[in-house]
Amino acid sequence: MRRIYKPKSKVAKADDTLVELRKANEELDRNAQTLIRTDLQLHRANERFDQQISQLHTLHRIGSSINSTFDLEVILSAISESMAKDLDFEKSGIVFLEKKISHKPLQSAYTGFSASEYRHFLDNFDELLLPALQSEDVYLQTAAYAPEGWARFLASLSISSLLLLPMRMKSRLIGFIAGARTHVTLRLTEAERRFYAMYAAQASGAIENARLYEALGQANLTLEEKVQERTKNLVEANERLRELDQVKSNFISLVSHELRTPLTAIKGFIVTLYHYDKEISEEKRHLYLSVLNEETDRLTRLITELLDISRIESGRIDIQWQVVSIPQAIQRVFDTLAIKAGPVKLVKQFPEPFTDIVADPDKLEQVFMNLIGNSLKYSPPGGIITVSGRRQQDGVLIEVRDEGPGIAFGEQEKIFDKFYRLDNETNRKNPGTGLGLPICRALVNLHGGKIWLESEEGQGCHFLLTLPLNRDKRVTAGGEGENGCPLKSA
């Protein structure tokens, strides 16, 4: 069947146009909404990009600041100020911890906190801060959602949000950074968390470098001090070796001379007696034998002193502890020196009774023999040598006083040095080894005592020595001390 075309009416055409316009308008609306969403996404992306650039600038700025110095205090202050200026925290701080397990705060810097607020902040380290630092790499606590303990803590510091950034080096906690907002509740995106983690890592590296530099400087200083000390010791040892070498030379020269003198006299008189025995009168014979006896005694004394000083220095001398009466020991020395004393008067002054001590009687008498014999050598005819004693709280004090020429102050300590002899007329006439007083000091020291000299030129010499009671020593003969025969006491 054939269709017949009928043109649309004007009304129908208008309706079609209206439908098309509606469709076009809807398409425009959809395109506009797409553009708005795209613009919003671009705006947000641009904001994130700007934020990332700002964060990178912050990292670069703080990195340049803290990596340009090895001064730990400067680094801590720079990081604390950066938290306030670059990251808009009203209150901030950085704490460096000690290496011990307790992680106690060791050194820190802060900005925005008052001194009392910061002390209160650190007072809660063990209870709140340390557990938080050990739990997360970026820890955020807000007053609006905080548990009771944290809520009280934040309120006491007028803080709305607190950010804690642990600083670690090889998994070891070396410190932390704190940033606080007072009116804003802080929220962190993952990107912001990564940024703060990088910020803390950069601070950790700078602090560890500063610590290593400080440790290296201290090690260099210690090494330098040790080198200087060893150099000084080597110089002193070298000087000591030189002194010992000189002492050895002096010793060989002195001993050679001292041995040769009596040996020459002994040899001469023996040869005389051997070849001219029948021609020598009895008087001269007696004189020669007397000289031989004196020179033999001198030689024996010299050898004895050398052996004594050798045993003392090598530690091979034994002390035979016995109960000793000091006055009796002095009297035996007086009896021995009576003939040699001649016109010099020997006086003994001890209170009765005088306490006994535990000592080696032979070595004690050797000390007194040297001291009194030395005083005899310098005493003028008719002079007096006085030996006195008195009890002290922990021992006895013995004094040997003479009326000789005395000794200058600068020489008083030297006379106790080995081989040292005063250069005077008396010593030139009476040669010796210079070992008597050093042996006295060594023997007194072995008894736990002390010996010294007090003197003025022209006023005589005053030797003093202290001896402890030594009642704790185990005696070898002649009775026992506190655990045996009781000692006499004054």
Image (spheres, rainbow, N blue to C red):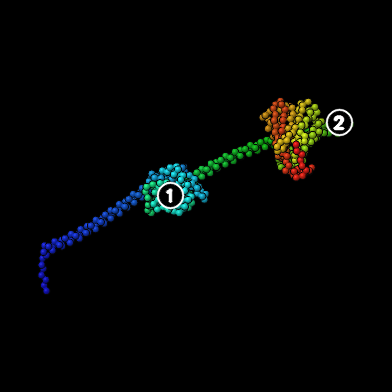
Between marks 2 and 1 in the image, the one whose residue lies nearer the viewer: 1
Quadrant of res 466:
top right
Please, what secondary structure does the residue beneath circle 1 have?
helix
- The foreground one among 178 and 428 is 178
Amino acid at the residue labelled 1: Arg
Q: Residues within 10 Å of mark 2 (few under 14, many from 20)?
A: few
Q: Residue at x 37, y 46 (%)?
A: 88
Quarter containing the C terminus: top right
- The foreground one among 381 and 268 is 381
Q: Residue at x 35, y 49 (%)?
A: 51
Quadrant of res 350:
top right
Q: Residue at x 48, y 44 (%)?
A: 107
What mark, if any, has residue 286 been given in the picture?
2
Q: Residues within 10 Å of mark 1 (few under 14, many from 20)?
A: few
Q: Residue 240, how many percent across, how many down?
A: 65, 37
Quarter containing the N terminus: bottom left
Circles 2 and 1 in contact, beta carbons < 8 Å: no
Query: In the image, is residue 178 above or below residue 352?
Result: below
The residue at which mark 1 appears reads as: 152
